[in-house]
Image (cartoon, rainbow, N blue to C red):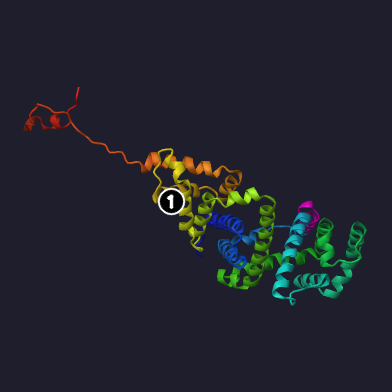
Amino acid sequence: MKARNTSEINKKAKSWLGLLNYRLAQDSADAGEFSARLKDIACDAIQDCNFNTLPKLTVNTDPMESKTRLIRGLRSLKSQKRAGDYLEAYRYYQEVQTVSEDTDSIRTFGDYIAIWAKATDQEPEQFMQRVAPKLNVLFAKWQEETGCSGLTDSETLAHPQEASKFLSGVNAVLVQETPENTLQSLAYQICHTMQKLEPQELLSSLAEPLRQASTVVTAQATHRIQEALTSNPTVKENILQPEFGALAELGARNCDWQDNYQQTADQLRDKLGQELAAQGVEVSNDLTDRTIAKLGKNDILGNLRDAISGNLHKRYIDTATTIWNTLCQRVKSIWQFQDSESPAMKDNILDFLFRRNK
């Protein structure tokens, strides 16, 4: 497998986010198109992984110590935050299911406990009997903190903080009631399976989960950006300026996406031509392309921040002026000797050619 450049994948992901901001500011973002692009980026990232290093995660590790550390981590505030992120993502996944009318993938809380039991090679009914008392304690605490009698999607999404604490507690209980040797065997099995899979085989098996995840992440990012643009009209106006538009479209061109670069570059040249001319700069297509390329070497999200703050315009003018003065302005130099009466004789030809004027 040919290794990919991780920095290129990161740059592509940032280009995706920068272009999404620009398209949403234009009110022209295609959710399906952006979701497909995000899936492609995720596939590139997976192909870049070195799965041969996975077995090192569990070698020479005491099973009981591993289990104790895992339970401690699942009960931490960091784990609760991750559960909260999951709930927020699930909110958007519900929207995806509603649009696609997908009901086959809907599961109950009990289904997930049974799935865990099967994945860890335990009899589901016996496992449920072992975890039920501890789950009842967690559920009673949930009811006390929220006043909810049930644990439906709408109730958990209405109380994200309490739901995050509950989910983290449930995960800790599932691990606690699973034998440590079984947990280690599961870890070995996962690592061994992933190590054996060829990249294309792995990507094929993840095709549907990646599609759903990309759709959810795109919907979530779109919602947040739209909220920000709606509440900050000035920010939207700044993003729509051709300075940032050209940079966003340059990123799209570099990623081999739809190429609208030339249109924004022309708009930028026309808009700033008079301002640059006032500083003695002759605006041309070449100068515009050079300036955009120079600014495009910076992080697109940094350029987005500058666009929002209004600093990108000044940076563009300064960069264009510098390029004009150093590269685009042609200076003609003529090497010329003063007249000399010294004859160019055979014996002193070198002295004649390399003579200096005193």
Q: Is residue 97 magenta?
A: no
- The main secondary structure of the magenta stretch is helix
Residue 212 sits in quarter: bottom right
Can you identify the residue that label 1 sits on?
Answer: 289
Is the residue 301 above or below the residue 151 in the image? above
In the image, which residues are magenta? 67-78
Q: Report the residue at 11% width, 32% height from top.
A: 349
**For this rendering, which residue is in front, 226 or 51?**
226
Circle 1: residue type: Asp
Q: Residues within 10 Å of mark 1 (few under 14, many from 20)?
A: some
Residue 268 position in % (x across, y down): 48, 50
Is residue 332 rendered to the left or right of residue 92? Answer: left
Residue 153 sits in quarter: bottom right
Residue 257 position in % (x across, y down): 51, 63
Residue 40 position in % (x across, y down): 57, 65
**For this rendering, which residue is in front, 117 or 149?**
149
**For this rendering, which residue is in front, 184 or 336?**
336
Q: Report the residue at 81% width, 72% height from top.
A: 108
Q: Is residue 75 magenta?
A: yes
Report the quarter where the C terminus lies. top left
Is residue 77 rendered to the left or right of residue 338? Answer: right
